[in-house]
Image: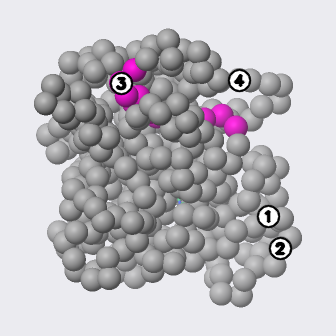
Amino acid sequence: MRVAVLANLQKNAPTWPGMPKDRWDDLDSEETIQAIVTALESGGHEATFLEGNPTLFETLPRLNPDICFNICEGHFGDSREAQIPAVLEMLRVPYTGSGPLTLALTLDKPMTKRVLWYHQLSTPPFQSFERAHEPLDPDMVFPLFVKPSREGTGMGVSAESIVHNEAQLRTQLRRMFELYDQPILVERFIEGREVTIGLVGNLTAPAARRLPDDHEAPRISRGLHFFPPLEVDMSRYPEEEAGVYTSRIKTELVHTFHYLCPAPLPSDLIEELNWLAAATFRVTGSFDVGRIDFRLDANDNDKPYILEINPLPGLNPGYSDLPLEAAADGWTFEQLVNRILQEAIDRYGLEEANSPAG
Ligand SMILES: Nc1ncnc2c1ncn2[C@@H]1O[C@H](COP(=O)(O)OP(=O)(O)O)[C@@H](O)[C@H]1O
Ligand SMILES: [Mg+2]
């Protein structure tokens, strides 16, 4: 098939005076894009990279792809990850991964948590702030964790994100509002291990963005392939990061990662994590691929808490979590990338449509 690889390269991103230096930390490198293009070619496809910005209105019709491999993070707006899929739907071009509704929802951590909360899925208690002086809900108990609502790659996350009292909370809120012009999320601080679950696949219907009434029903995760859990070994990172998976660890220190994959976890806990990952994938309406981040509460028997779902997980073959998890499962990077594409091809029924019999 002819595949357009749509992404936002760090080097193509707009710049302006006074721009925060971490502004484009979650955009992709040329190395990642090249690896994806090569992987798709090795899968027998013709693959071309196109920058996911307004130039697409010209470049996409010219290329006329059968399908797009979309990993655009977008540049501006509170639904920036949803913009390219929305345009592709308008142009009626198929693409990999989740659609606009899911990408807009999951970019916004508090909105996602409201959905998780409604379904009684375990996520830390939280309050979202629009101003630094708003009163703290009485049931929010210190220590708390402060982070931007709509960023990734640890942006705004540092040792100072953990706050132990009112004064620290207000200072950190003010700092976050100054740096990130968006609501700030305050959560109960979950002290404990850091685990992430990657998966590929699609739920078999009906998957109407809700949980089955019977929680034991196997269809909660039918159609999904879970990779082995990956644990970030926080004990191996500098002490000043305070056991938090910070922006510094995710950028400056990204090449010296300390991961345990498969994570040394008991099988019943892995089963519970996979169930929660599938439930999160389901209630957010995700497609094809995802990675769900957890913390295990050291003070409550390693009880898992969902922090977020990443429907566009990083795909750098050398250091991103998902490719490393796939590798721990015996998959090559080529297999991972081509499986994501195949999931979308199957979802759209493209092969039947193209086959002579179809
Ligand atoms: N409620 C919390 N309790 C403890 N640590 C947290 C909490 N929320 C986030 N963290 C830490 O911050 C990191 C980044 O948070 P996350 O919500 O996953 O955002 P990002 O989009 O930056 O990955 C987590 O991996 C974890 O180390
Ligand atoms: Mg995360």
Residue named by callout 1: 130
- Viewer-closest of 6 and 270: 6
Number of marks: 4
For marks 3 and 2 on the same chain, the one whose residue lies earlier in the sequence: 3
Residue named by callout 4: 14
| Span highlighted in magenta in the image | 65-76
Q: Are marks 1 and 2 in contact (CB under 8 Å)?
A: yes
Q: Are marks 1 and 4 in contact (CB under 8 Å)?
A: no
Q: SS class of the residue under badge 4?
A: loop
Crowd class of label 1 (few under 14; some 14 to 19; many from 20; radius 10 Å)? few
Instruction: Give residue 164's position: percent from left, percent from top.
Output: 67, 73
Type of amino acid at the residue the image marks with label 4: Pro
Q: Are marks 3 and 4 in contact (CB under 8 Å)?
A: no
Q: SS class of the residue under badge 3?
A: loop
> How far is disc 1 from disc 2 in space, using C-alphas?
8 Å
Q: Are marks 3 and 2 in contact (CB under 8 Å)?
A: no
Evaluate whether residue 26 shows in this view: no
For marks 3 and 1 on the same chain, the one whose residue lies earlier in the sequence: 3
Numbered label attached to residue 66: 3
Of badges 2 and 4, the one in the foreground is 4
Q: Is residue 108 left or right of residue 357?
A: right
Q: Is residue 160 left or right of residue 319?
A: right
